[in-house]
Image: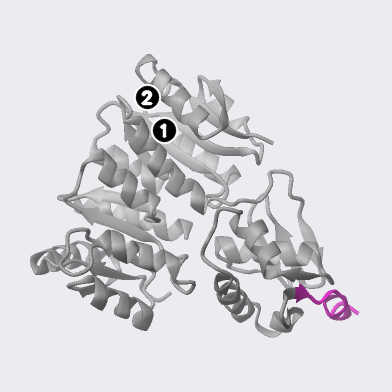
Amino acid sequence: MKRRFVVVGAEEAAREGLARIASESRALAIWVDTAEEALAEKGADVSAFLISARLRDASAARLCRRLRRIHPSSACAIIVYGTQIDSISLVEALDSGADLCWSVPLNTPVCLAYLRALLRRVSLLKPSAPPVALGEIELDPGRRAARLGGRPLALRCKEFDLLYALVGKAGVALSRETLMREVWGTEYSGGTRTIDFHVSQLRRKLGESARLVETVPGLGYRFAAEAAYGKLT
Amino acid sequence: MPKPRILLIDDEEDFHAIVRQSLEPLGYEVLSEPDGEAGLERLRRDAPDLVLLDVNMPFKDGFEVCREIRAAPELAALPVLLLTIRRLDHEIVQGLDIGADDYLTKPCEPAVLAARIRRLLERA
């Protein structure tokens, strides 16, 4: 599915640049005029909101705060754009959940580089990924929320994706290459040592449940399905 | 909660003091190193939460340090903010494309730097 960018309150001066940024990011641009319409875009396939600093019906910072309750930073980028955004408004926007502020006229190549950097951090999970629960572990990719034994578990972006991939195929041994592809995307060339490092971080956070992430010698890792169920009974 | 730890890698010692003065009152612990080699060593030893990286430095420039950070599995996820006087379009694009998470040009307002850091730490 194509990712979507929601453009909110586009002024004439920024329209062309925003359209180019969306098309070069291979995203479908959705153009809306007001904060209310932006808030109605709740889909997990929205990977960025591009918000005018001068909206008709709300301040950009207020809209950022409300959007962040629906779209977490790990799943969606928020950018505020406008002519002559002063540093007070800039700081307010960032503290309200915006990732970047762009000045109009937009410098498209530079904007695209910032956006690429931002989207690298945003999850590569498919928009339709469903929540999963196994034994004491519950993962909700839409909200990027992980729980262990009912308590919230603070995972970094890649740790979450890694655990989600393992739990989603519980009982099956996954090779390092498969995990690299699913969690980091095909273009990542950091080598499979990256996986081993993230698995060790993940195990540390899982505490007693760390043993559920099993090493399969010479291949990769497996989430121990039986053991996870066993804890319940 | 422990103080977030920030490592500044910059060859301008005067700038270390400026960054310290702007960030320490906000509850950050600021470490600093004067060059890329020492910076990479410190990163591995002290595992900071974020790195502020200058570009123009002797021996090893900030772009090279950034590449090495991204190539090292234990550092690959570390938030990197390039903070430099280099302000040409192609330099910004290059810096972000080799793996920096954010790019700010010097001089920058302390309040803006602090807000960008908060944002990066929240997202990491």
Label of residue A11 in the image? none
Q: Position of residue A184 (x, y in %)?
A: 59, 58
Residue shown at 47% from the left, 40% from the top: A78
Q: Is residue A20 above or below residue B80?
A: above
**Picture coordinates of residue A97 (x, y %)?**
45, 46
Q: Quadrant of residue A183?
A: bottom right
Numbered mark located on residue A60 in the image = 1
Residue at coordinates 70% horizontally, 63% vertically from top-left?
Answer: A178
Q: Label 1 lies in what chain?
A: A
Range of magenta residues: A222-233
Q: Is residue A92 magenta?
A: no
Residue furthest left as drawn: B14
Q: Is residue A91 visible?
A: no
- Pick whichever of labels 2 and 1 is earlier in the sequence: 2
- Which SS class for mark 2? loop
Q: Position of residue B7 (x, y in %)?
A: 28, 70
Camera-side residue of B95 and A50 = B95
Kindly identify the amino acid type of the residue bearing the numbered disc 1: Ala
Residue bearing mark 2: A54
**Disc 2 to disc 1: CB gap under 8 Å:** yes
Which residue is painted at 50% across and 53% down in the image? A121
Picture quadrant where residue B64 is located: bottom left
